[in-house]
């Protein structure tokens, strides 16, 4: 009886294994595609200092207490890294940790904020706000404070438009004469105004041709970082240019510009008339 060479056995076995592999592949379910990474997921910063700052930037007026999961969603950092950085921030009193595991801005930030306020007077901080709002809206922007029964213009940026409403620093106007800034000043200093309901609901006042014909204005309150009411910022222009949409856009522009300089257009949570 003749024996089969080893090479012959090997060559016969190879196609058999291939056939078995193909049958196995056909029987096994198809692999699911890898899940796509959401484009909106935040990308964590690379530097240690930047990572720490990204944690502090998660806190806002509407998000004063955040859990670890919420901080992870906001920063894109994994929880182990977050816990390590939060430990440093808690020890530095820049972040406070509550017994329930929530985190909030710490007392050291208040100290830094007070130092910032002492570095710049209100005019130094407000003037860039007025300039920014004027550039974006194209209209005259002014800041008024209440003095008895009058409002006084402390700062202003006049529009570069040839046809515009001109405001002078130091100008005094009776609160009873009207205008959106007068209503905001009266509302936030304990006075009465027919716009009280709208201001309480919307956070700003709008008037059209109330004091001056063909002129419209929109005003927002200005609060400092400690919650103290400072005055009213008003955007003034021709009524034909100041549609309701344009005025609401001006409010958004003013609110953002104020926030960038440490102000707020919203009263503190414990504010009462």
Image (cartoon, rainbow, N blue to C red):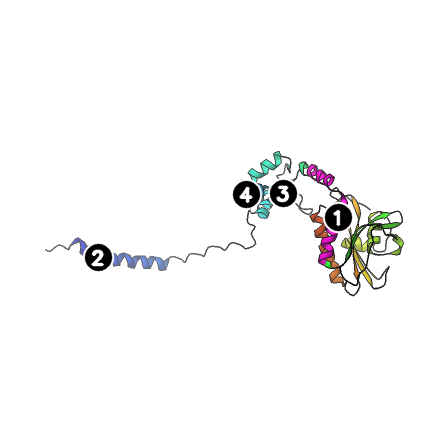
Where's the N terminus, which quadrant? bottom left
The residue mark sitting in front, 4 or 2, is 4
Q: Are marks 3 and 1 in contact (CB under 8 Å)?
A: no
Q: Earlier in the sequence, mark 3 or mark 2?
A: 2
Is 88 situated left or right of 227 in this image? Answer: left
Residue 83 image offset from top left, x and y in percent: 56, 39
Quick check: 241 left or right of 52? right
Q: CA distance from mark 4 to mark 3?
A: 15 Å
- Disc 2 designates what residue? 11
Q: CA distance from mark 3 to mark 2?
A: 68 Å
Q: Which residue is mark 3?
A: 56
Query: Quick one: label 4 or label 2, which is nearer the N terminus?
Result: 2
- How many numbered tags mark residues here? 4
Tags 4 and 3 touching, CB below 8 Å: no
Answer whether residue 112 is visible to the viewer in this image: yes
Q: Secondary structure at mark 3?
A: helix
Does the magenta portion include 116?
yes
Question: Of residues 42 and 152, which is closer to you in this image?
Answer: 152
Q: Which residue is mark 4?
A: 47
Report if the CB atoms under discs 3 and 2 are less than 8 Å apart.
no
Q: Which residues are magenta?
A: 110-136
């Amino acid at each position: 009886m003749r024996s089969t060479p080893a090479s012959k056995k090997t060559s016969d076995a190879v196609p058999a294994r291939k056939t078995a592999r193909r049958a196995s592949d056909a029987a096994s379910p198809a692999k699911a595609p890898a899940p796509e990474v959401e484009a909106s997921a935040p990308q964590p910063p690379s530097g240690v200092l930047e990572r720490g700052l990204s944690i502090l930037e998660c806190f806002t007026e509407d998000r004063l207490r955040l859990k670890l999961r919420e901080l992870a969603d906001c920063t894109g950092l994994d929880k182990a890294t977050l816990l390590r950085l939060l430990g440093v921030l808690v020890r530095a009193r820049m972040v406070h940790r509550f017994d329930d595991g929530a985190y909030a801005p710490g007392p050291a930030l208040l100290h830094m904020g007070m130092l910032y306020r002492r570095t710049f007077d209100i005019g130094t901080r407000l003037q860039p706000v007025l300039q920014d709002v004027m550039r974006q809206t194209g209209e005259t922007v002014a800041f008024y404070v209440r003095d008895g029964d009058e409002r006084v213009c402390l700062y202003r940026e006049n529009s570069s438009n040839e046809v515009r409403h001109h405001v002078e620093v130091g100008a005094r106007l009776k609160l009873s004469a009207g205008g959106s800034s007068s209503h905001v000043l009266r509302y936030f200093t304990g006075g009465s105004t027919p716009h009280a309901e709208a201001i309480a609901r919307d956070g700003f006042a709008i008037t059209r041709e109330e004091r001056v014909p063909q002129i419209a204005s929109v005003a927002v309150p200005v609060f400092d970082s400690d919650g103290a009411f400072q005055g009213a910022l008003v955007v003034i222009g021709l009524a034909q240019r100041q549609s309701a949409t344009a005025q609401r856009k001006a409010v958004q522009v003013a609110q953002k510009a104020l926030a960038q300089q440490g102000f707020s257009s919203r009263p503190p949570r414990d504010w009462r008339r």
